[in-house]
Image (cartoon, rainbow, N blue to C red):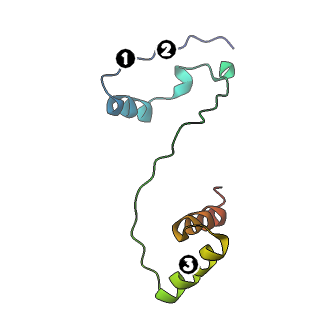
Amino acid sequence: MNRKLKSIPEFRSEAEERRFWETHASSDYVDWNKAERVRLPNLKPSTTSISLRLPVTLLDRIKIAANKRDVPYQSLIKTWLAEKTGKN
């Protein structure tokens, strides 16, 4: 199926581009059948800080488990959460 693709407009800012793609289908602008997979090895995922209250005894057990694995307890918590949610 050969259909005419719309041209992607020029954007003045990332926010303007984000608003555009939130309201427009990319398939009207990109032929995804010709897309190629790329690897971006230096891309860092966005993160945000959270505050989490844990019972002292639970935190102590987590710290002991982290110490046995020789990793920071915060990293162990992130690993466990990723495993539990299936997002490794």
Image marks 1 and 3: residues in contact by CB distance under 8 Å: no
Label 1 and label 3: CA atoms lie apart by 51 Å
Q: Is residue 26 above or below residue 76?
A: above
Identified at 58% across, 84% down, the residue is: 61
Q: Nearer the viewer, residue 36 or 70?
A: 70
User: Where's residue 85, x and y in %?
Assistant: 62, 63
Q: Which labelled disc corresponds to residue 6?
A: 2
Q: Quadrant of the C terminus?
A: bottom right
Q: Residue lying farthest bottom? A: 57
Viewed as shown, does residue 67 lie left or right of 54? right
Q: Is residue 54 above or below residue 15?
A: below
Sequence-earlier tag: 1 or 3 = 1
For disc 1, the marked residue is 10
CA distance separating discs 2 and 1:
13 Å
Q: Amino acid at mark 1?
A: Glu
Nearest the eye: 85 or 20: 85
Q: Nearer the viewer, mark 1 or mark 3?
A: 3
Pointer 3 residue: 63
Label 3 secondary element: helix
Residue situated furthest left in the rendering: 12
Residue 12 x, y percent position in the rendering: 30, 22
Label drawn at residue 59? none
Would you say 79 lies left or right of 59 here? right
At 45% from the left and 17% from the top, the residue drawn is 8
